[in-house]
Image: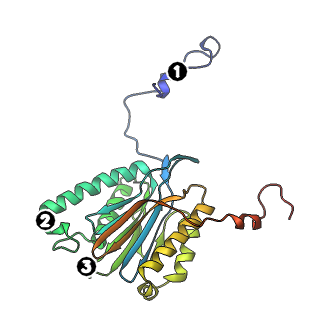
Amino acid sequence: MDHRPQAWGRPRDDVYGAYDHSYLQNSGPRQATQAPIVTGTSVIAIKYKDGVVMAADNLASYGSLARFPDVKRLRVFLDSSVVGFSGDVSDMQFLDRHLTDLSIDEAYEDPSCTAPHGKGHLNAANLHKYLQKLLYKRRNDFDPLWNQLLIAGFDGHSKPYLASVDLRGTSFTSPSLATGFGSALAQPIMRRYAETEEDAAKLTREEAVEVIKECMKVLYYRDARSLDRYSIAVVTKEGVELKEDEQLEKQSWAFAERIKGYGTQTV
């Protein structure tokens, strides 16, 4: 079935007239994406003493419609780093293909880089700088990639590394990071456990995973663009452990009874 606008009909051509095709031009100036259409919501991540834990749900929303419930938004790079994507899904797919090409080029130039922390390896810190330059260049071209990215892995000194970059090329690092609604809902929870680098260095892997799972539960409760199925990645010096079809556990909506101010309620 042809869904293009020029194939749309009118209820009655004898009353409303035939569809006007004159404005549909095949030639004209090049136009860039002006607003995201299909989007993914929060990505969250936290450091611990031996690595980084990152998670994102599997939902891609078409506006306010929960349209695609099986979109994975965490990507492994060279089995040593993870990139989490929020924002426009089509731009995420473009970046995913670009990173795949980059990893192939890196492997051809130096086969040892396929092993974590191999000689000449493009580590997470270098990958973050590369993506920051890429997004800043696209912003200067007035054709931005409508994403905010989290990059997790290790730096050149084999220390856990976590950084963010957005569509304007703004970048920074922190012991815990979140995008979207997660910056308001999940970040306060993660900062209880990893407000500073010293706090993050005291966290165990099990504690970091539990913090991330609790944050994903809060996001599902409070963010209308989230889902109860999610992907979670644990980055260690041995590589990346990625699970892409996890289910939230121990959900409880009992707190909803205490929420006031929505609809017709008697306070």
> 138 and 45: which one is in front?
45
- Eye-nearest disc, 1 or 2: 2
- Where is mark 1, residue-wise? 20
Secondary structure under badge 1? loop
Q: Is residue 10 left or right of residue 31?
A: right
Q: Secondary structure at mark 3?
A: loop
Q: Where in the figure is residue 241, as x and y percent of width and height? A: 34, 67
Percent of width and height locating residue 126:
27, 71
- In-front residue for pair 225/131: 225
Q: Nearer the viewer, residue 50 or 14?
A: 50
Q: Amino acid at mark 1?
A: Asp
Residue that numbered label 3 is attached to: 156
- Structural crowding at the residue carrying mark 3, measured as other residues with C-alpha within 10 Å and reported as few (<14), some (14–19) or many (≥20): some
Q: Are marks 1 and 2 in contact (CB under 8 Å)?
A: no
| Side of 64 where 173 appears, left or right | left
Where, by quadrant of the figure, is residue 165 drawn? Answer: bottom left
